Amino acid sequence: MIKRRSGPVRNERTHQEILEATAQLFALGGYDKLTIEGIAQEARVGKQTIYRWWKSKGDLVAECLIAGMLLPDRLALPNTGDIRGDLHRWLTEIFRIISEPNTEGMLRSLISGAAENPQIGARIRESLIGTESITGRLKAGIGQGQNLYEGAPFDHIAEAFVGAVVLRVLSRTPPSPEDATALINAIIGPAPPTLRSPQ
C-alpha cells in the first residue's frame, strides 16, 4: 500500500513565482511596503497559498534572502583574495544596508524568521558560515600575512562577525565609518605592520 503524503504539496513553479514576486515588489517599495496581499496579486495566487508555505512576510523574505534573490550584490562576501579588505567591504556594505529605511526591516525579518523557524536558522548558518562563505574565506586567508593560522577556530570567528551584525540590527545602533575596521581588529587582530598603510 502506497502511503500518501499528508499536508500541502508544494508546486515548485508556484513557489518560485511567489519568491520572484516578493523580490520584485521589495525592489520597488522596500520591506515596509511589502504585503502578503500585494505578493499574492503579483504572483497570481491566493493569500492562503502563501500562508500554507510561509507563516509570515518575514519568513518569505528570509527565504528570498537565503536564495540570493534580494540584494545579492550587496550581501555577498567579496572575493578578491584579500580577506581583510573583503571583510571590510562586506561589513561596510551591511552597515550601510542597516542604516537604509527600505532595507533595515529586511534584516530584522531574517533574524525573526530564524528565531521562529529552525530550518531558516540552519540555512542561514550554512550560507554564512559554510565552506564557501566566511569560514572558508578565513581559512583561505592563512598565509596572507593576517593573524590566521592552521587550527584557528574559524567557525567561531565567523560567528563573531555574524553575531556583531545581528546585535547591530537588533539594537538599531547607527554605524560609524570606523566600525568595520574596529570590528575586524577586535576579532582577528590588527593588520600586521607589513600590511598597514605608511603614515
Image: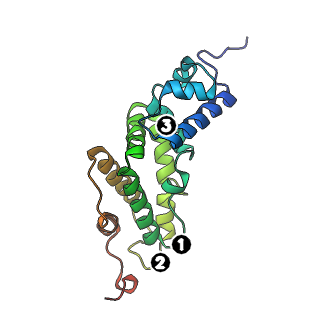
Q: Is 160 above or below relative to 117?
A: below
Q: Secondary structure at mark 1?
A: loop
Residue 66 percent location from the top left of the image: 52, 44
Q: Residue at x 47, y 73 (%)?
A: 142
Residue 80 percent location from the top left of the image: 54, 71
Residue 181 percent location from the top left of the image: 33, 69
- Residue 54 visible, this orientation: no
Give the amino acid type for the residue marked by disc 1 in the picture: Gly
Q: Which residue is mark 3?
A: 61
Residue 31 in which image quadrant: top left
From the image, state whether disc 2 or disc 3 is nearer to you.
3
Q: Which residue is mark 1?
A: 81
Q: For the N terminus, give its image quadrant.
A: top right
Cα separation, mark 2 vs mark 1, equals 9 Å
Q: Residue at x 60, y 15 (%)?
A: 6
Closer to the camera, 21 or 134? 21
- Label disc, if present, on residue 98 of the rendered structure: none
